Amino acid sequence: MKKTQVKEATIKALEQMIRHADKGPSGFWTDAYEGCGNPEIFPEFEDGLKRGELVKKEHCLCPWNTAVMYGDGYGDINTGCYHSCSIGKARHLSVQQLKEVLARFKMRLENGDYDNPNHLESLLTENENRQIENCILAKQREREWDRESKRQKQLKRANALILKYPNKKEILTTYYGEDNWVNEDGGLIFFKPGSQKNVVGAEEMSYDEYLDVQFASLGHPYRSGFARGFFDNLFNFKGQIEKVNAKYICFKRIFISGMYSNGEIYEDKEDHVWMDKSGFEKFGEGDNISFGAEVYRYVKTGNGKRIDYGLRNPVGIQQIGEYELPSNDELIQQEIRQIICETCFLNEQCNGNYCTVKSKEKNLLEQEMFEIIKLEDV
């Protein structure tokens, strides 16, 4: 279309937007992610919402372009409204204000004010701008009130646990009753209501009893190598059978092969692991086994109730020959490298495959951290 035809199409669309200002503002395109097109004003946009396809109207300029709405210093009309859109703010205008803003934009468009402009005058008046800012501030205060109201309700619901664990007040008021989890001081806390049904030994616990056991478990040893299976991919387990009885077998040590969410492969191990004998019946003491398995949580009893992690439902079981376990030092070095990567100032720019930090500096840091950890273990 020629430039004059595009302008005429825009003016025609603006007239329709003015007539239907009571239905809110509209832009000129939409898709499955809603975009800015208002299907109550332009019915053709309904197709984009339903089919997930881009639907757009021809337009030379949009009134909700940030540079148009606010004038010089707020962008460039040549970048297009997709990259500089303020329709969200326009939604705070009243019906009458919308009509006036659109009529003002239509007049300026017809007069050629936006044809190669050297100066962009704000489309909004001071009163309109103040209306928008007041609405945004009111919404912000409403959200803050909602957050505080929710916090007070959480405080009331979690009161018994807060009294028992006062140092966990902030966590409890934030996550109590939420579908979330927290890695907190030597353990994991799962807050999702009903998730105790999937924890062996906790099926009949109330929600507070379930949280109580989890908090009581913090700081106590647990099988962190298996716990990773809730967040990372655990590919394979290898172990040597140490003991066998009528119902269970015990692995002297299980070697874990896994992958972090960033694609990095890692190794870990857990000692003295008991599993149900089902699936392992044909194997005996001293046999080396490779298998896959599901990680599960259970309540361990003994010196009080504690949450721990185990393996069940083994698959792909096969006998293997001798295999080499990573040494404790190798596992420590692996953890150090992971910590360095996670805390690196270039972490957000890193693709996880190639390290841009100078090797000499990184190696020196790894060695210093390794020596500190070894001294603490002595």
Image (cartoon, rainbow, N blue to C red):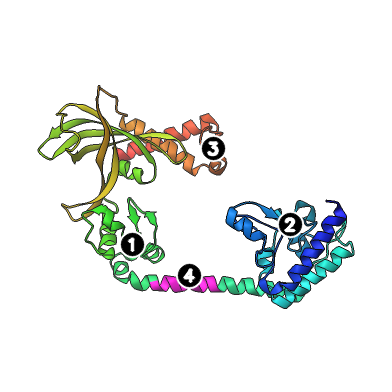
**Residue 326: where, in percent of width, then height?**
32, 29
Residue 133 within the magenta-colored segment of the rendering: no
Q: Helix, strand, or loop for circle 4?
A: helix
Query: For the magenta stretch, what is the residue range?
Result: 142-153
Q: Is residue 243 left or right of residue 27?
A: left
Q: Are marks 2 and 4 in contact (CB under 8 Å)?
A: no
Choose mark 1 or mark 2, whichever is in front. 2
Residue furthest right in the image: 111
For disc 2, the marked residue is 57
Classify 10 Å Cα crowding around label 1: few (below 14), some (14-19), many (20 and above).
some
Residue 174 at least partly seen: yes
Choose mark 2 or mark 3, whichever is in front. 2
Specify the amino acid type for callout 3.
Answer: Asn
Classify 10 Å Cα crowding around label 3: few (below 14), some (14-19), many (20 and above).
few
Find residue 76 and report its image quarter.
Answer: bottom right
For disc 1, the marked residue is 193
